[in-house]
Image: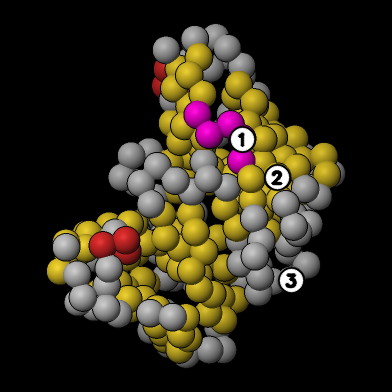
Amino acid sequence: SQQGEEDPQALSIQEGENATMNCSYKTSINNLQWYRQNSGRGLVHLILIRSNEREKHSGRLRVTLDTSKKSSSLLITASRAADTASYFCATDNQGAQKLVFGQGTRLTINP
Amino acid sequence: GAVVSQHPSRVICKSGTSVKIECRSLDFQATTMFWYRQFPKQSLMLMATSNEGSKATYEQGVEKDKFLINHASLTLSTLTVTSAHPEDSSFYICSARDLRNSNQPQHFGDGTRLSIL
């Protein structure tokens, strides 16, 4: 299956700064989802943005979607040490049951 | 919110043992469940997709006789790693969704760390 691409692969910032992660994909989608994974744990669903939406907010999270460029971004504002985790985007592709995951971004927030 | 429970969280056993992992959707009906394998510092690798009441669809390269999947109800799927060997050691994660609503998210269990000695 085609996997989406995320960049950067790793990001290390100071607490309080904003973190931006990007995701690109290749096919037409129903929606795009962002997940967080703490080390050794399962994935936690963060936010789902539909193909007809351009921006969505949830607390300190802001997600954008540009279907013309087949790309999405996740912005975490005012980062905290507890935000340290891996973040994955996943696309729900038209005509498919399964999500296609990106390679993930490992985010480290330094206190 | 929706919760997926995966059990056990960790298994350590001898080579040749068969190991069963359970995945339950606790407050929604999961028409479809997915089983993933994850290696350290890598993304999730889909192993198989199971629809309630039918045979699982395995991804290329995944041995169906090695990884037995049963999805007998809308709330339970099981993955059995048969005659496990050290190379089967990995982190296995299940997830579930209700495909009757295409814009509902997919929810994940907390994973099972399998270690074969």
- Closest to the camera, between mark 3 and mark 2, is 2
The structure residue drawn at horizontal position 37% and vertical position 72%, both measured from the top left corner, is A24
**Image spot of residue B55 (x, y percent):** 77, 39
Count of marks, rendered view: 3
Q: Which amino acid does label 3 sit on?
A: Asn
The part of the chain drawn in magenta is: B6-10
Q: How far apart are marks 1 and 2 (CA)?
A: 9 Å
Q: State which quarter of the image contains the N terminus of chain B.
A: bottom right
Q: Which of A87 and B47 is in front in this view?
A: A87
Residue A20 visible in the picture: no
Q: Which amino acid does label 1 sit on?
A: His
Q: Distance between the residues labelled 3 and 2?
A: 19 Å
Whether the residues at callouts 1 and 2 have beta carbons within 8 Å, the answer is yes
Q: Nearer the viewer, residue A57 or B37?
A: A57
- Identify the mark at residue A78; answer none if there is no mark: none
Is residue B24 within the magenta segment?
Answer: no
Mark 3 or mark 2: whose residue is earlier in sequence: 2
Can you identify the residue that label 1 sits on?
Answer: B7
Q: Nearer the viewer, residue B56 or B36?
A: B36
Residue B114 drawn above or below residue B27: above
Q: Which chain carries label 3?
A: B
- Identify the mark at residue B24; answer none if there is no mark: 2
Report helix, strand or loop for mark 3: loop
Residue A30 visible in the picture: yes
**Image spot of residue A44 (x, y percent):** 49, 59
- Is disc 1 surrounded by few (<14), some (14 to 19) or many (20+) residues within 10 Å? some
**Image spot of residue B79 (x, y percent):** 65, 32
